[in-house]
Image (cartoon, helix red, strand yellow):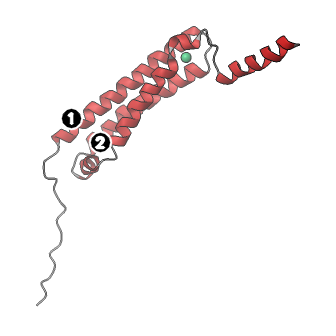
Amino acid sequence: MAVRRFLIPSFVAILALGQLPSTANAFGCPKSMAEAQAAIDKVLGDMKGEMSKQMKAGGMAAEFILVHALLDDAKMFLAGAKHNHTKPQNQYDHARAIAKARAAKGSAEAADIYHFKVMAMMPKTPKMPKMPKMPMKK
Ligand SMILES: [Cu+2]
């Protein structure tokens, strides 16, 4: 009776964590996925900055979209990693999760590098839209 009282809650707790301690943790999927998410969040944060807004307004909207394309790749890889990790059929799926999580981090880092390259290409003084001349008051 005492054994059942201990074992059943322990088993439920392991199920709740979604992974068996001996297998999934050895791959370190959660750490790789967290690193990928952090790399994605870093670029998303940078893209809310003032220079990124000027990129869009200053004739570099196409490059801005390409930064997003690299980020979309990163998000796609990360979603795949999460799927393989949370619904593994076997150890191979955890290995695939690691591969996809690291690909996600790589794409996010490439987005970061490209974003900064594009910002460096921007003209120093962004062109302001021409304002209509106001009639002079006498
Ligand atoms: Cu895993």
* Ligand 1 quarter of the rendering: top right
Q: Position of residue 23 (x, y in %)?
A: 59, 9
In the rendered image, the vertical position of residue 53 relative to residue 68, given as above or below: below
- Mark before the other along the chain sequence, 1 or 2: 2
Q: Which residue is at the front of the view, 28 or 73?
A: 28
Q: Amino acid at mark 2?
A: Phe
Farthest-out residue, front: 2
> Measuring 51% from the left and 24% from the top, which residue is drawn there?
80
Instruction: Specify the quadrant of the image occupied by residue 22.
Output: top right
Numbered label attached to residue 101: none
Instruction: Specify the quadrant of the image occupied by residue 83.
Output: top right
Q: Position of residue 118 (x, y in %)?
A: 22, 38
Q: Amino acid at mark 1?
A: Lys
Task: For mark 1, give the secondary structure.
Answer: helix
The residue carrying pointer 1 sits among few (fewer than 14), some (14 to 19) or many (20 or more) residues within 10 Å by Cα, namely few
Q: Residue under circle 2?
A: 64
Q: Residue under circle 1?
A: 117
